[in-house]
Each structure stands twice: as structure tokens, then as C-alpha cells.
Image (tube, rainbow, N blue to C red):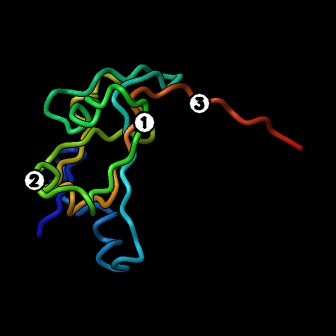
């Protein structure tokens, strides 16, 4: 079983953190990926995902604003295939959207659960103080 990620191509394939933790802790650990189709982050607008990303497939459930998929219980097939998933962390630059992804040889090997939100909305800061 090979699990690879390449958020930046120049770094080459790497194991996902979730797969490493699952190897160490076994069934006591669940690797959960949280993603979204598109939206406004408050500091940048994230466009619809590129057609080759799994985010497109997950976003097809347009009748639901958010849902989760337990890959441990999902039928074998499309979820065992290689996939690319968009990665947005730290500072997001919309001009680099096509380059910001992670490739895995199998979604079920990399993640136990996928959480998908159709449209992201800006952060609403909590008040400071008592």
C-alpha cells in the first residue's frame, strides 16, 4: 500500500500525516479530511475546484450543504482509486489554486472519513475577553 502526497511537486511524493498516525495507532485513530467545494474565506474567494479533483465529485451532492462519508464503510470501488484533493492551509493565494493539491494513490488508504462542505463562508471572530 502506497500513500503519497505532493502539495508542491518539487518536494516529491510523501506519506500523509493521517496514514502515518493510523499506522502507529491502528483503529484507535481516524484520519479525517475536511474540504469544501468553493466559497469566500473573507480574505480570498476560492473558485470551483479543477475538474480532476475529488472535490468535484464530493460537490455533486448539491442537495446537501455539508455531509460526511465514512470510507471504512463505503462500497469498494471509486474510493479505492487514486485521487487529487485540494489543500488550503495557511495563506491561500487564488492564483496558485491549481498547484495546491495533494495526490493519494487511494482515498481509503489515506483517509477514514471525508467531511465535505459545499460552500465555505468567511470566519466570524469570537469576541475577546470575559
| 83 lies left or right of 101 | left
Name which quarter of the figure residue 62 lies in. top left
CA distance for labels 1 and 2 = 23 Å
Mark identifier at residue 77: 2
Name which quarter of the figure residue 89 lies in. top left
Evaluate if marks 3 and 2 touch, with contact meaning CB atoms under 8 Å apart: no
Q: Which residue is drawn at 43% across and 30% down?
A: 65
Name which quarter of the figure residue 57 lies in. top left
Q: Residue at x 41, y 35 (%)?
A: 117
| 90 lies left or right of 1 | right
Q: Is mark 3 on a helix, strand or loop?
A: loop
24, above or below 36, in the image:
below
- Residue at the spot of label 1: 66
Q: Which of 13 and 27 is in front in this view?
A: 27
Quick one: label 3 or label 2, which is nearer the N terminus?
Answer: 2
Q: Residue at x 24, y 60 (%)?
A: 110
Mark 1 residue crowding within 10 angstroms, few (<14) / some (14–19) / many (20+)? some
- Residue at the spot of label 3: 123
Evaluate if marks 1 and 2 touch, with contact meaning CB atoms under 8 Å apart: no
| Placement of the C terminus among the 4 image quadrants | top right
Q: Which of marks 3 and 1 is in front?
A: 1
Amino acid at each position: 500500500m502506497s500513500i503519497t502526497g505532493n502539495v508542491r511537486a518539487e518536494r516529491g511524493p510523501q506519506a500523509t500525516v493521517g496514514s502515518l498516525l493510523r499506522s502507529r495507532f491502528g483503529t484507535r485513530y481516524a484520519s479525517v479530511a475536511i474540504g469544501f467545494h468553493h466559497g469566500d474565506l473573507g480574505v480570498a474567494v476560492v473558485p470551483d475546484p479543477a475538474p480532476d479533483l475529488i472535490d468535484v465529485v464530493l460537490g455533486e451532492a448539491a442537495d446537501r450543504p455539508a455531509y460526511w462519508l465514512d470510507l471504512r464503510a463505503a462500497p469498494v470501488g471509486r474510493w479505492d482509486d487514486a485521487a487529487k484533493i485540494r489543500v488550503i492551509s495557511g495563506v491561500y493565494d487564488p492564483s496558485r489554486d491549481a498547484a495546491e493539491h495533494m495526490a493519494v494513490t487511494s482515498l481509503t488508504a489515506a483517509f477514514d472519513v471525508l467531511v465535505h462542505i459545499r460552500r465555505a463562508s468567511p470566519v466570524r471572530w469570537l469576541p475577546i475577553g470575559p
